[in-house]
Image: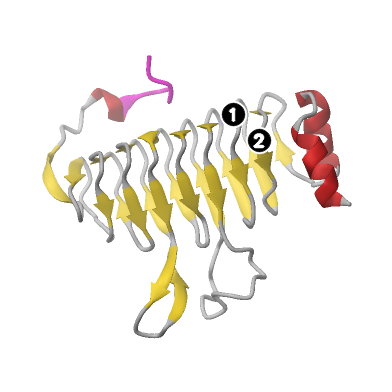
Amino acid sequence: MKKLLSLVVVALPWPLKRWLLRKVWGYRIADSARIGLSYIFPGELEMGEHAYIGHFNVAIHLGRVVCGEYSRIERGNWITGHPPAGAHFTHRTGRDPSLLLGAHAAVTKSHIIDCTDRVQIGAFTTVAGYHSQLITHGIDAVTARQDCKPISIGAYCLVGTRITAIGGAVLPDRCILGAGSVLNKAHTEECVLYAGQPAVRIKSIPEDAAYFKRTRGFID
């Protein structure tokens, strides 16, 4: 019954949709937050003030989605994972199938985000362009089983178009990841441009760069 109701809810006017999402699913959605024509049904959903999810997005099989204030998920993104009580990944006892967006963070259009384990995108960070993939799970050839690790993108980062990030990858605060790059490990140095396949340190970025000092996420 709840599954059928979810299909109906997607197309309802926002005030009624918000009321049902709060009442039936128990989601915590701020009055000023908004979801467009999208299928967003994680286990838990929290949307801060002015958080926005646009049209034609899908978010399913997730433990939780947290959207900080003024964060944005634009259009046509596929966000999925493996539920906490799923049959796989039982050896990962601390697995957290969640998407966490910081305040003023933005995910633009047509990206794939696999949240088999946690994907964290920091405040004022932009996952820009199109067709990037953040993939937290894969096959471990040594053990011949599926495995997963979280992905962490820091605050005030700029992630270029068509990148790939895999489980265990970390992009530190105030960094740029060049277009087409493959982020495959945990980096630690801030204020750096990383790029390449795999991504490596290319050069430093001034700490006083305007992008790192924004007080709102949207860029004119």
Q: How crowded is mark 2: few (under 14 residues within 10 Å), some or many (20 or more)?
A: many
Residue 14 falls in which quadrant of the image? top right
Magenta-tinted stretch: 213-220
157 relative position to 39: left or right: left
Identify the residue at horizontal 46%, vertical 50% (top origin).
120
Disc 2 marks a residue whose amino acid type is Ser
Spatial distance from mark 2 to mark 1, Cα to Cα? Answer: 7 Å
Camera sees residue 173:
yes
Can you say which quadrant of the picture contains the C terminus?
Answer: top left
Coloring basis for residues: secondary structure
84 relative position to 175: left or right: right
37 relative position to 144: left or right: right
27 relative to 74, above or below: below
Residue 142 falls in which quadrant of the image? bottom left
184 relative to 26, above or below: below
Q: Position of residue 100 (x, y in %)?
A: 52, 47
Q: Main secondary structure of the magenta part?
A: loop
* Label total for image: 2
User: Is 59 covered by the magenta stretch?
Assistant: no
Disc 1 marks a residue whose amino acid type is Gly
Q: Verify CB contact (< 8 Å) between mark 2 and mark 1.
A: yes
Which residue of the protein is positioned furthest toward the bottom in this rendering?
143
Q: Where is residue 60 in the image (x, y as percent from the top left)?
A: 64, 51
Q: Which sits in the foreground, 173 or 134? A: 134
Identify the residue at horizontal 25%, vertical 43% (top origin).
180
